[in-house]
Image (cartoon, rainbow, N blue to C red):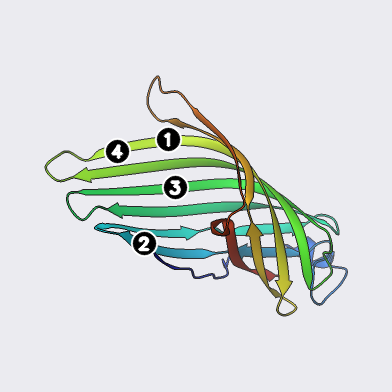
Amino acid sequence: MKKVLLTAVAVFSLTFVNAQEEKETTGVGFSKGNVFVSGAVGFGSSSTADVKETSFTFSPKVGFFVTENIAVGVKLGLESTKNDDGVDTIEKTNDFSAGVFGRYYFTPSSQFSVFAQLGVDMTSSKTTTDITGFPSMEGKSNGFGVAFAPGVNYFLSDNFAIEATWGMLGYNTSKPDVAGAESTDNFGLRLDMNSINFGLLYKF
């Protein structure tokens, strides 16, 4: 299995005049009134025998410090996956999520700071399966999720920081977009190396 991960800043045009006026400190770290954007872009590829999987993810966030320690914000999630068995079947899945999050920073004014994040998301998913000689099949589902994850920020300069989260304790429910379909509920904890996510953050 070969994976390539590229992290990048999710750049958005955003103006918070009042927030800028409320900044109390400068330099590394955060203070009340700070606005930040963060995110990651991921590309992945893996193969086993004749089966090949490729994936793309994009997960931007915009946050605002309402107090010295607490930040709230909005986030998006995009993920596209393609599985090709090398014979006659290709399956494509596109996932989209939109939600809100809150963070509590334990040492916000420091160069290195640990935070706890709680997020709530609305999700939608679409899967298309193409089998040679058969009509294309499509499935859709919608869902809702709540997740908790610890994380860290390390400032490289006054404005740029590396961001990382590890693990996830969460609950989600999803229901196929078909009349009479039943919902599926999941609750779980992930603490493996695959649950480490890196990104970049820019503070205004």
SS for callout 1: strand
SS for callout 3: strand
Q: Which residue is mark 2?
A: 46
Q: What's the mark number on residue 138? A: 4
Furthest-bottom residue in this view: 157
Discs 4, 3 touching: Cβ within 8 Å: no
Discs 1, 2 touching: Cβ within 8 Å: no
Which badge, 3 or 1, comes first in the chain's sequence? 3
Q: Position of residue 164 (x, y in %)?
A: 65, 64
Q: Which residue is mark 1?
A: 141
Q: Residues within 10 Å of mark 2 (few under 14, many from 20)?
A: some
Q: Quadrant of the N terminus?
A: bottom left
**Image position of 16 (left or right of 181):** right
Q: Which image quadrant is residue 104 in?
A: bottom right
Q: Residues within 10 Å of mark 3 (few under 14, many from 20)?
A: some
Which badge, 3 or 2, comes first in the chain's sequence? 2
Looking at this view, is 15 or 86 the one in front? 86
The CA span between labels 4 and 3 is 14 Å
Which badge, 1 or 2, comes first in the chain's sequence? 2
Looking at this view, is 4 or 34 the one in front? 4
Q: Hey, what amino acid is under mark 2?
A: Ser
SS for callout 2: strand
